[in-house]
Image: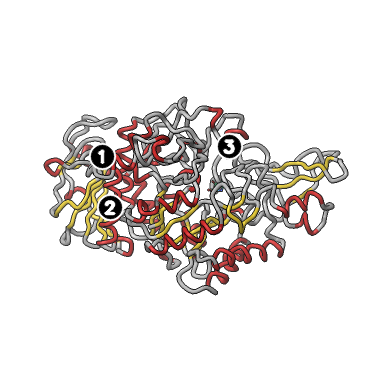
Amino acid sequence: MIYQIYPRSFADGDGDGVGDLPGLTARLDAVAELGVDALWLSPFMASPQADAGYDIADYCAVDPLFGTLEDFDALVAAAHARGLRIIVDLVPNHCSAQHPWFRRALAAAEGSAERERFHFRDGRGSDGELPPTDWESVFGGPAWTRITEPDGRPGQWYLHLFDASQPDFNWQSPAVWEEFRRILRFWLDRGVDGFRVDVAHGLVKDPAFPDYRTGPASGSMGGEGAPAPYWEQPGLHEILRDWRRVLDEYDGDRALCGEAWVSTIAKTALWVRPDEMHQTFNFHYLETPWRAEALREVIDDSLGAFSSVGAPSTWVLSNHDVVRHATRLGLTAENPQGEGIGPDFPGLPDPEQALRRGRAATALMLALPGSAYLYQGEELGLPEVLDIPNDARRDPTWFRTGGARYGRDGCRVPLPWEAETPAAGFSPSGRSWLPLPDDWGRHARDRQQHDPDSTLSLYRRLLSLRREHGLGTGRLRWLDPAGLLGPRQEPERADAGEGGEAGDAAAARDALALQVGDVVVLANLGAAPRPIRAAGEILVASAPTPGRMLGGDAVVWLDSPDVPETR
Ligand code: NOJ
């Protein structure tokens, strides 16, 4: 179980309105008592913060915004003392334009060793005035920016798959390989237990630099549509193997986990072959709609693909780049990853239904064998924040698309801790780098702490049962939901009034039943309640189960050593 900390929004220790390492250390018990194994921290290294720290100017320094290296050491010690491992973010695809290497490259001549560490190219057109390829930045606009040469002439172009302030490294350059070995060792020597690898799918570019039209839906981190000449290029596996060798020099279990938006689950599994990374995010699971058939298929495909290379499957529903799942699962219109939503989004959800689904989806995910990733605040059932004033938005996506895409600020709003304090306890000064909604305090941890029906209590119970029943290392088998859940108790939504065979078929489509170890999990994905027919004590449910009735959009775990045969 890995819990993602987004440091700038977790807890602010010094009152400047941005979360920091001392603030995190002071609140560590809240995470420890959730019952997770490791914390992954989004970047806290020295950075101009153009992309919230994913633009690093010094990979081996802590940005003063977040504290000092001593604060980091104190955090590691405090985490280890509580049995929590620490995973830090490694950002190898690009650095900040303020990184000394890039500044030197700008000052150096065309074709110099300094420029070789990045992708500098001459432009097209009679005067080099057109970008070298048609590639688009993930955040919108062209992926190339033209520089002014030291002598004042308009000059070459450099590649940035993200913001113009994030130049891409050239992984053909041996100096880049050497530098990242040094960075890995720096943090490993400081006691970190692993790395989450940012944009692992983008490190290597097709050396021919062909044109590629991404089309209108180009807002995602990649992994969609026709193979792009900058995603999933075969050469990048050599880089992963190099890093694996470095990690293997160290004692203990040090892990690499890839952020790789890859086109198929089968290809995703190639990232975790025995000599590459240990885990990789399963974004296919995150992107699966709340439908029984689709979920069953993605779960089967994931378990099959990952086990074929001897790696655990991973599961994730939320992170700092996607609409929070306690909102997303209720959306009624398409919303490509990275676009974000605002108050004018045409498919806004019913918040109660979306939270119900969010809780149910977590209850399903936490039953699955493998390794699950949680994102800070989901244990409070936090929704996506929709009404951030436009002048307070920070995501480069918002600026690079002239406000056409909201981007990711809505899932990054600081955490509410205590309802009745300034900034809901996030910051002692009441300041906050993104404004908090007026009613943010109603989600506060102190409100949920002792409420048995709160989302926080649900997460705690799920996590402790997951551990107690060894579900993470269990084996999954599917059961026939028909015998375990009775018929729907009232007509519902689109298939209202369906009866007989058609009704049964629809009801089967709306349900899932599975067993992992001695736990049976029933999921009702329809809107109408259904009686729980399966025997066994109810261990936990994502919604109340009065009279053993499982409500719509709800999941229950039962303690059932004896269950009917597999379907
Ligand atoms: C993926 C990170 O998760 C995201 O937040 C960031 O903007 C891009 N990579 C670029 O580093």
- Residue that badge 2 annotates: 462
First in sequence: mark 3 vs mark 2 = 3
Q: Position of residue 432 (x, y in %)?
A: 48, 36
For image coordinates 26% across by 32% down, the residue present is 495
Q: In this image, 305 relative to 507: left or right? A: right
* Secondary structure type for disc 2: helix
- Choose between 456 and 286: the one closer to the eye: 456
Counting labels gives 3
The residue that label 3 is drawn on is 397
- Residue on which disc 1 sits: 506
Q: Residues within 10 Å of mark 1 (few under 14, many from 20)?
A: some
Q: Callout 1: helix, strand or loop?
A: helix
Q: Is residue 137 left or right of residue 112?
A: left
The quarter of the picture where residue 361 lies is: top left
For the C terminus, the image quarter is bottom left
Q: Nearer the viewer, mark 2 or mark 1?
A: 2
